[in-house]
Image: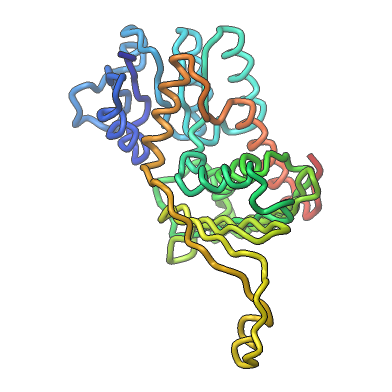
Amino acid sequence: MLKVGIVGLGEMGKNHLRVLKDLRGVSVVGVVDPVEKNIDIQMSIEKLISLNPDYCVISVPTKFHLDVTLQLIEAGIHFLIEKPMSIDSMSATTIISESERCNVKGAVGYIERSNSAMIKAKDLLNQDFLGKVIQISTRRRGPNPMRIKDVGVLKDLATHDFDSIIWLTEMKFKSIYASSYSKDINGNEDLISCVGKLEGMINATCNVDWITPTKIREVHILGENGALQIDTLNSDLIHFNSAEITSTDRFISHLRGRAQGDITNIAFPKREALFTEHENFRDYINGESVEIATLREALQVIKVAEAATLSCAENKLVYL
């Protein structure tokens, strides 16, 4: 039975607590949060460390990630940290170097990797289902969550998409151009649009905001042999086969084109992504080979976000 602590009990922290209470093989021994008082295992981080948990979940605001993580690393406690790993690549590099020095295991909570539709799409891509991937595009839109105060939409949301793109294609960003919009001229960005080029000459686009009044979470992957459309909100995966059947009905062909392929809503088992993420991290701590977002992978995502920030500021293409 692994002993687990949680540092930060905001909206995401409460979800972590709910899942961990039902996760086989772990026991929550303490929670640290300066605001939340209505929980019987609330304590200081010093008290939590004194209980020698096997690992902790870190879900405090991003600007506190470095300090909290270093305290846990110094105590030899493994950690699962919410994305992004840290506020910038310099502090993220410090987390990596210190965790390696102290032989402490860490991973980052890029939950989309644990979404059932994303897992199925990744499996199909590994089977060369679409042939060569030509383009991958994402749309992550919705109303302002209000709970996010310390970062803009780039680090809070677009980092999910950067990680998903790199993970699905197994290719790194080579360049990126980005443009942003802020409702408050002195505030963080509320919308960002990015166009990138990956290794293997794959095109990537991301459109992210927290202004749109309806929530959208989509990934589109275009290959030589068709396309996949992922809806991570509903964990749906649709395959559009390459056009093969010719239509001679001029009214239909005017709307849909002169040729059309099969459209398949792919069926697969669906599980809660956060539960899968925690199962994987538990098994990782126990020495098993499982899917996690490593610290070095998370550092690459932060570097893409920093390049996008620079691109917005200087209105230029930035190479990584």
How far from the left and from the top, in percent, is residue 258? Answer: 68, 82
Q: Nearer the viewer, residue 61 or 202?
A: 202
Give how far across and how far down residue 87 sits, in percent.
Answer: 58, 33
Q: How many marks?
A: 0
Left or right? Give the position of 193 relative to 34: right
- Toward which corner of the image does residue 51 lie, by quadrant? top left
Which residue occupies the extreme front position in the image? 245
In the image, residue 121 above or below residue 94: below
Give the image's coloring scheme: rainbow
Residues 259 and 212: in front is: 259
**In the figure, is residue 137 to the left or right of 317?**
left
Residue located 67% across and 80% down the image: 246
Q: Provide residue 72's location: percent of width, then percent of height.
A: 45, 14
Q: Residue at x 51, y 32 (%)?
A: 63
Res. 159 visible in picture: no
**Relative to 6, is 198 above or below?**
below
Q: Is residue 86 left or right of residue 32?
A: right
Instruction: State whether residue 234 appears in this view.
Output: yes
Vertical placement of 109 versus 219: above or below? Answer: above
In this rendering, is residue 88 above or below 123?
above
Percent position of residue 290, x then y: 51, 26
Taking 97 as reference, is 85 left or right?
A: left
Residue at the image position 51 percent from the left and 46 percent from the top? 120
**Could you tell me which quadrant the C terminus lies in?**
top right
Which image quadrant: the N terminus?
top left
